[in-house]
């Protein structure tokens, strides 16, 4: 049974050969991270890219062709790398302007420690839904929430889990999000039908996460005098070193207003940088050269509070270079796997083994998860399974809305849970989780980002039970025919 929708001038590798670069790369990552205790996945991924290239050359590809595949994926993801650069600038300038210190100050004085985790998730969901970018939300509001959590003596990984849950869930259902538009685009559906079809998993997952964060807040967090003294010390230090005022939230308001007006993320974030620079000059007394330094190298301050020092000495483009270099290498590896046909061979082998809807739906979700794990690219984890599985759904006469939901959940939501993935690398860097310094306990944010993994699990359960699994309407089938979409022959499938 032919399952490929992609033509290639070279022979597709066998399953055994296609698995070679995947298995060897995962083994190298395991040795680097767990045996040597060094969380720097860059070189194992680079070696994996080289191994993949050798597989391609064995299959008859020229290096130029492999190179084109590598740089194609990198090029497609350049807007996200640009967002990373802008977030680095934004963090450094917003700290200097007093925007981030003001958010921390008001958060510590207005929020109750017991409801903080739940409030953090909701706030990040709303901001991410408005901005259409989980990365922008994590790097700005998420950073401020990490400071508030530190003031409440909440472990970093709990706060990070709540931030990631909210930010990536808001991104998942925002019509302004690139991934939310990519999933329906590659499966032949429209974005608003796609968003509506995700509600059966989105709403329960968010409610489950909300309840867990509330329970954690009331059982894990003490209201003792020591905590209040620590909060008072932090807020006093912020007042001594910064002008604190609600007006200093103007840069954040600028970004939100532009996002609501559907301005693209890159100019919106850059406008936030400019607004922050103006506020820093006129309210905090920063000079023009200081602003340029903060945007490039990050903000620097020495106070009597160690908590303030560790939290606010950050930001700048250079602080993102570790993350950016990891993302570029991971994207290159993913591009090489796609160009050489290794990913296609693996997916094709899976698809020949499933003949029922619940098997295909499960395979589509898990294929997106596996692509996130192996290729390190959330875009590839959506685009590749979307292209490969769509003809199968059409052949089974199931709506491809099922597929768009599966790849969105296995792609967008799982991305931040893989440390060497573009999403996971950004979360670790932007929230200051310091995994590279050996603080592996901060990886606990992964299981604590409940909304991100509960949603795919619910989707898999629905698939087994046949719940929320729409069949293709006559209108949808007519559209397939009109657009000459490929339809697999699955007439015997159940």
Image: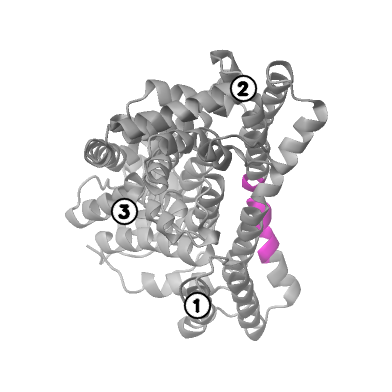
Q: Which of marks 3 and 1 is nearer the N terminus?
A: 1
State the residue in front, 348 or 50.
50
Residue assigned mark 2:
251
State the residue in front, 324 or 265.
324
State the residue in front, 104 or 118.
104
Determine whether label 3 and label 1 are within 8 Å by CB. Answer: no
Query: Gap between marks 3 and 1, in whole Å?
Result: 45 Å
What segment carries the magenta color?
A: 69-81
Residue assigned mark 3:
397
Q: Earlier in the sequence, mark 2 or mark 1?
A: 1
The nearer-to-camera label among 2 and 3 is 2
Q: How far across and down, in percent of the image, does residue 494 sit?
A: 22, 62
- Report the disc number at residue 203: none
Q: Which of marks 2 and 3 is nearer the N terminus?
A: 2
The correct choice, above or below, for 301 with respect to 412 in the image is above
In-image side of 277 versus 129 (left or right)? right
Residue assigned mark 1:
31
């Amino acid at each position: 049974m032919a399952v490929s929708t992609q033509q290639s001038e070279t022979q597709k590798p066998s399953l055994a050969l296609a698995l070679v670069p995947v298995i060897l790369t995962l083994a190298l990552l395991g040795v680097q991270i767990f045996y040597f205790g060094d969380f720097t996945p860059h070189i194992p991924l680079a070696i994996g890219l080289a191994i993949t290239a050798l597989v391609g050359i064995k299959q008859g590809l020229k290096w130029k062709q492999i190179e084109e595949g590598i740089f194609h994926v990198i090029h497609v993801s350049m807007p996200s790398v640009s967002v990373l650069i802008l977030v680095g600038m934004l963090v450094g300038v917003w700290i200097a302007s007093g925007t981030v210190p003001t958010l921390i100050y008001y958060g510590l004085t207005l929020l109750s420690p017991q409801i903080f985790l739940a409030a953090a998730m909701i706030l990040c969901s709303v901001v991410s839904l408005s901005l259409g970018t989980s990365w922008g939300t994590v790097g700005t509001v998420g950073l401020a929430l990490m400071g508030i959590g530190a003031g409440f003596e909440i472990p970093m990984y709990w706060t990070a889990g709540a931030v990631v849950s909210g930010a990536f869930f808001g991104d998942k259902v925002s019509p302004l999000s690139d991934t939310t538009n990519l999933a329906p685009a590659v499966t032949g559906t429209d974005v608003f039908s796609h968003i509506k079809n995700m509600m059966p998993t989105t709403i329960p997952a968010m409610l489950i996460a909300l309840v867990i964060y509330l329970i954690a807040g009331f059982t894990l967090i003490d209201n003792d005098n020591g905590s209040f003294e620590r909060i008072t010390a932090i807020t006093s230090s912020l007042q001594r070193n910064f002008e604190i005022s609600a007006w200093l939230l103007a840069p954040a308001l600028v970004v939100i207003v532009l996002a609501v007006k559907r301005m693209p993320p890159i100019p919106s974030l850059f406008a936030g940088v400019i607004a922050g620079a103006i506020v820093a000059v006129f309210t905090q007394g920063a000079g023009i050269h200081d602003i340029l330094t903060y945007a490039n190298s990050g903000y620097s301050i020495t106070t009597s509070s160690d908590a303030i020092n560790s939290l606010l000495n950050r930001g700048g483009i250079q602080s993102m270079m570790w993350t950016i270099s990891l993302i570029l290498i991971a994207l290159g590896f993913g591009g090489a796997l796609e160009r050489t046909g290794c990913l296609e061979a693996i997916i094709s082998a899976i698809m020949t083994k499933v003949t029922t809807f619940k098997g295909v739906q499960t395979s589509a979700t898990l294929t997106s998860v596996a692509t996130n794990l192996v290729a390190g690219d959330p875009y590839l984890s959506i685009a590749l399974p979307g292209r490969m599985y769509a003809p199968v759904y059409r052949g089974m006469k199931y709506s491809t809305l099922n597929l768009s939901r599966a790849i969105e959940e296995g792609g967008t939501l799982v991305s931040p849970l893989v440390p060497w993935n573009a999403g996971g690398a950004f979360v670790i860097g932007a929230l200051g989780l310091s995994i590279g310094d050996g603080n592996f306990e901060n990886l606990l944010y992964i299981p604590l980002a409940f909304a991100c993994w509960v949603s795919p699990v619910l989707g898999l359960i629905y698939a087994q039970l046949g719940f929320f699994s729409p069949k293709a309407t006559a209108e949808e089938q007519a559209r397939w025919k009109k657009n000459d979409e490929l339809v697999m022959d699955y007439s015997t499938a159940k």
